[in-house]
Image (tube, rainbow, N blue to C red):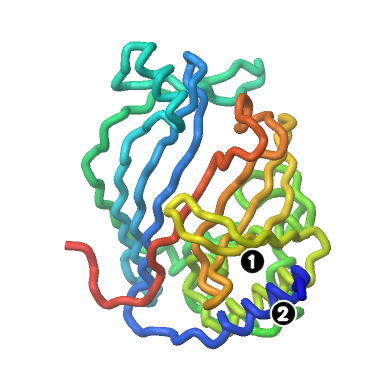
Amino acid sequence: MRLSARDVLLAAAEKAGRQVEGKGDFWHSVTISRNVYVAEDGYRVVDRSSSEQWTPADPKGEQWWRTRSLGVQPMTDADRQAWEAAGKPSEIDVRMPAKDRKNKPGRLTLPTTPRPERFDSSKLVDGHVFWLGRNVTMKDLRGLPDEPEALKKWLMASYAGHGTESTSEEMTGDAWLFRVAMGLIMDMPVTPEVRGAAFRMLADLDEVEVTAGVTDAEGRRGTAVSVRETYPKGGVSDNRLIFDEATGRPLANEHVVVRSGGYQAGLEPGTVWNSNALIEASWTDTLPR
């Protein structure tokens, strides 16, 4: 029997809510990010980077980051041939969408070789971290309601008709709720019960779609739940969360081109133009050296 999207998400909620939570003074997460760009010469490239973060449970503590650019590479064999025909540049100029009032496109130069790791740290300001599209404390996150309706009410109190990162990005309530709920599921230090409640919230959204047998950028197979997003300059993408249906654990967040435009200009429908693969998310007492 074919299960509905709601059935799949409710089953994931049950498994996510039963996960065992560890202990530690820091919430530690590791992600591998990929972004696809179109080079000035017309071929496509993938820019990869790694990010590791330690967020303290103590509101007076220090937050740490370790980041590294892994370099940009041609996306496919055909793109590699085009790059080679262009002289194998070690730095590639890529197209950026127009951002200024004159509507002139920008340019970004990306290196093909990895860069050294960077370590950064800073004290939390009044114990706050920018998560869920707003400043919250670890106490806020740890005290979130684990009942779907109460959690939705708490989250939607911050909805103002736009995206979590920009006031110029108009966004429906379902798309906004999907985005913040996905953050809870992916890599935020909430309780397993809250993660389960976030899956249940997704099951109640009218706009969500579920697709089985999806492979993320790290080659891991899972199930995707997605919602469609429309951007100011005409682009349309499916924002999707890929998770392991057997355990309810998140694998990746990806954006897939539906209609080219804006940040996706020049990319064919079906292209995964942005990906954040979650490698690890857990409590730890170990800080970077």
Q: Is residue 1 above or below residue 136?
A: below
Residue type at the position of mark 2: Pro
Q: Is residue 216 left or right of residue 65?
A: right
Q: Which residue is mark 2?
A: 148
Q: Is residue 87 above or below residue 114?
A: above
Q: Is residue 236 above or below residue 17?
A: above
Q: Which residue is mark 1?
A: 181
Sequence-first disc among 2 and 1: 2
x, y (%) of residue 273?
55, 39
On the image, which quarter does residue 52 sit in?
A: bottom left
Residue type at the position of mark 1: Ala
Q: Dot 2 lies on which element?
A: helix
- Please report the residue visible at 39 percent of the width from the left and 41 percent of the height from the top: 48
Observer-nearest of 116 and 253 = 253
- Please report the residue visible at 52 percent of the width from the left and 77 percent of the height from the top: 247
x, y (%) of residue 254?
56, 50
Observer-nearest of 109 and 84 = 84
Observer-nearest of 191 and 271 = 271
